[in-house]
Amino acid sequence: MAGLSRRSRRCASAALFVLSSMLLIATAISLRWTVVSRYSDRCSLLISGACIEWVIWPDDWRDRYSASFREGLVHAWFRADEPLVLSWWLELGNYMWGRDYFRLPLWIPLVFLTTLAALLQCNSRPSPGHCANCRYNLTGDVSGICPECGHG
């Protein structure tokens, strides 16, 4: 982080805060909605219950599941009557129909991204007695203008 310029840190911090906000919105939506997207013949991404889940389908999944579940389509449905089941830790396992899955609770990347953004933001402030633009040490300078970059 020390090698990044002040502007780069600010941009990176803003991007991380935007990603964190999007992740927080996805978490809130996933508490009552389920969103599924099929990426390939055997893999799907599922967001539900404040988790993101990578599902690997068995070879005979077409015989067991709806033919309307085509590649590239995104399916979403509201889960009003279903109980809310939250997962707090990473899970790796399989469902009773032979589907393997990897489940990642959304709070883990949310905490990671927010902490990283906050660290970038905190480290972007210059120490007292240094130029706010280039961080040149201004000890003993009485003019108020940085001799290195001209920032006042």
Image (spheres, rainbow, N blue to C red):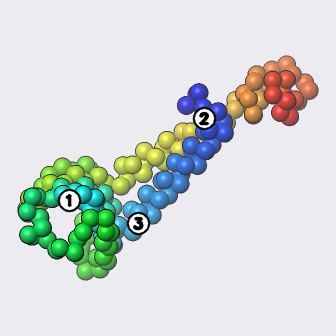
Q: Earlier in the sequence, mark 2 or mark 1?
A: 1
Looking at the rendered image, the disc whose residue lies closer to the viewer, 2 or 1, is: 1
Few, some or many C-alpha atoms within 10 Å of disc 1 (few <14, some 14-19, many ≥20)? some
Q: Which residue position holds label 3?
A: 28
Location of residue 3 in the rendering, given as x and y in whole percent from the top left corner: 59, 27
- Residue 13 higher or lower than 83, as above or below: above
Q: Which residue position holds label 2?
A: 123
Question: Looking at numbered disc 2 in the image, what kind of residue is underneath it?
Answer: Asn
Q: Earlier in the sequence, mark 3 or mark 1?
A: 3
Location of residue 39 in the rendering, given as x and y in whole percent from the top left corner: 28, 58
Under tag 3, what secondary structure? Answer: helix
**Does 125 sit left or right of 116 as displayed?**
right
- Residue 107 higher or lower than 149, as above or below: below
- Residue 70 higher or lower than 39, as above or below: below
Name of the residue lying farthest toward the right: 143
Q: Are marks 3 and 2 in contact (CB under 8 Å)?
A: no
Please name the residue shown 58% across and 28% down the image: 2
Location of residue 54 in the rendering, given as x and y in whole percent from the top left corner: 25, 55
- The numbered mark at residue 41 is 1
Few, some or many C-alpha atoms within 10 Å of disc 2 (few <14, some 14-19, many ≥20)? some
In-front residue for pair 9/141: 9
**Does 11 sit left or right of 76 as displayed?**
right
Question: Looking at numbered disc 1 in the image, what kind of residue is underneath it?
Answer: Asp
Please name the residue shown 8% across and 69% down the image: 63
Please name the residue shown 48% across and 44% down the image: 115
Please name the residue shown 35% across and 67% down the image: 30
Few, some or many C-alpha atoms within 10 Å of disc 3 (few <14, some 14-19, many ≥20)? some
**How far apart are labels 3 and 1 at the CA level?**
29 Å
- Residue 108 higher or lower than 31, as above or below: above
Assign the C terminus to one quadrant of the image.
Answer: top right
